[in-house]
Amino acid sequence: AKKVAGEIACGVCQVVIGGIYANLRGGDEVSDSFDVNQVCTMRSLARTMKGGQWEVVEHGSKHVLQRSAASVFYEEINESDLVFHWQSMAVREACYKVMRREVDIVETAEEMKANEEEDGRGICKKVKICGKSSVGALELNAEL
């Protein structure tokens, strides 16, 4: 799950951070919106991933985050020894990896808040979570 987390970190950043940024209102305190203890809870991530129908899929030798036509499943409480959902764990680990850059994310979001054309996914590129070779979150039927 940790290897996959590294591969999907850019996509998770775009979906999670981009989603939070898109929902910011004019008077919202940016730093409160990007609190790692709220952003990376499995319940919050499961809702975000299910809501957007984002699925962890194998693509060649790597894993990517891609929108699914079918409904997707994420375990909100992934602590059981009986049932382990590795995709949920990979998404949570990717979120923690992304949020290690919390200070940079908050600073960049503050700077970008003035630009109404920005959708928030650019934050991931500016804080170097998404590089030139990163595969971000893919829309349905997107090609690499």
Image (cartoon, rainbow, N blue to C red):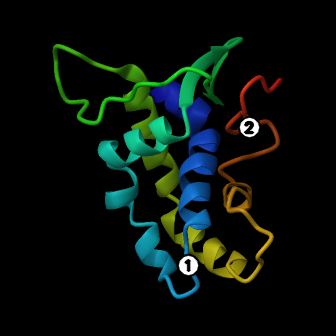
Q: Which residue is tagged 2?
A: 134
From what the image shows, is residue 70 above or below residue 23? above
The mark lying in front, picked from 2 and 1, is 1
Residue drawn at point x = 68 percent, y = 62 percent: 120
Residue drawn at point x = 72 percent, y = 27 percent: 140
Task: Give the SS element for disc 2.
Answer: loop
Q: Earlier in the sequence, mark 2 or mark 1?
A: 1
Pointer 2 and pointer 1: residues touching (CB < 8 Å)? no
Looking at the rendering, in which quadrant would you find the C terminus? top right
In the rendered structure, the answer to whether residue 60 lies left or right of residue 76 reads right
Q: Label 1 amino acid?
A: Arg
Task: Give the SS element for disc 1.
Answer: loop
Q: Which residue is tagged 1?
A: 25
Pick whichever, 141 or 120, lies toward us. 141
Q: CA distance from mark 2 to mark 1?
A: 29 Å
In the rendered structure, the answer to whether residue 91 lies left or right of residue 115 reads left
Residue drawn at point x = 71 percent, y = 11 percent: 60
Residue drawn at point x = 56 percent, y = 42 percent: 12
Q: Quadrant of residue 42?
A: top left
Q: Label 2 amino acid?
A: Ser
